[in-house]
Amino acid sequence: MVEKRKLSKLPKLPVNIKEIEQFPAMFNRYYADHFGLRELLTHYYKMLKYSIGDSSSEHVTIGKNGWLFLGSIKNYYKGYSDPIGDVRNINLYSQQELEEFSLHINRLSDWLAKKGIQYIFIIAPNKHTIYFDQLPGDILKVNENSATDQLINYLREHSTVTQVDLRPALINAKQDHQLYYKTDTHWNGYGANIAQYEIMLEIEKLFPGKIQPELQNIEDLVFSGGDLANFIGIDINRIYAKPIF
């Protein structure tokens, strides 16, 4: 299936004046959805658009080297919390939002502490943040600091909650391995491996000797498709990483 929608059904033969008036438009919609080789032609049309960097979905931006990113640079776009606006540092927190976020985090931490539970606040970056260099060249940052930078800096001054910012480790590790799928929004086995290791390091500090942080051995397997590839109706095999146990 190349489109995420229900195709039009063959309309019943009209039996009254109103249905006769509606029948041509209904049949045209049916024919447009079911003419011969439609799925094959639609698939190759979308593959052609992908090959020239033209996305067939407003929710997907085609970057460099075949990378796909959720979101759009269009001014009116607000879908999926506008991830490209986020990575361009356009969508920033207000002072009130920072205060409310900090208050919520502190209350949650205090509530867990009363139950003997240590709370750790983890920043898990999206693909846009780690692979900003693979976005189209005309997508530029508007401000120096991001909303995440704002939040981390504010929490450092107004909270005692332990923080783990995964961004530096992932940015450093991407020099050796691909950490996110090209055609999907999520990180792959390598990315998850780095993330779990950084989190375990912080937990080990809180509970010395209780765990042994370690990076897992990873093998590459073929990955087909991806949520972003499905958005634009293409099917591409990619390599993905899987832990070896």
Image: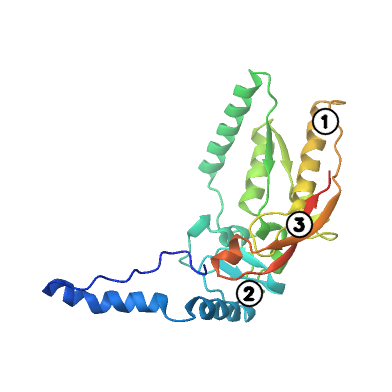
Residue 87: % across, % down: 63, 59
**Relative to residue 35, is residue 163 depicted above or below?**
above
Residue 48: % across, % down: 59, 81
- What secondary structure is marked by label 1? helix
Residue 210: % across, % down: 84, 26
Residue named by callout 3 = 179
Residue named by callout 2 = 138
Q: Which is nearer the N-term, disc 1 or disc 3?
A: 3
Residue named by callout 1 = 205
- What secondary structure is marked by label 2? loop
User: What is the distance, in whole Å, between disc 1 and disc 3 at their CAs?
Assistant: 26 Å
Three-letter code for the amino acid on which mark 2 is drawn: Asp
Q: Which is nearer the N-term, disc 3 or disc 2?
A: 2
Three-letter code for the amino acid on which mark 1 is drawn: Lys
**Relative to residue 71, is residue 13 depicted above or below?**
below
- Residue 72 visible in rendering: no
**Relative to residue 31, is residue 90 depicted above or below?**
above
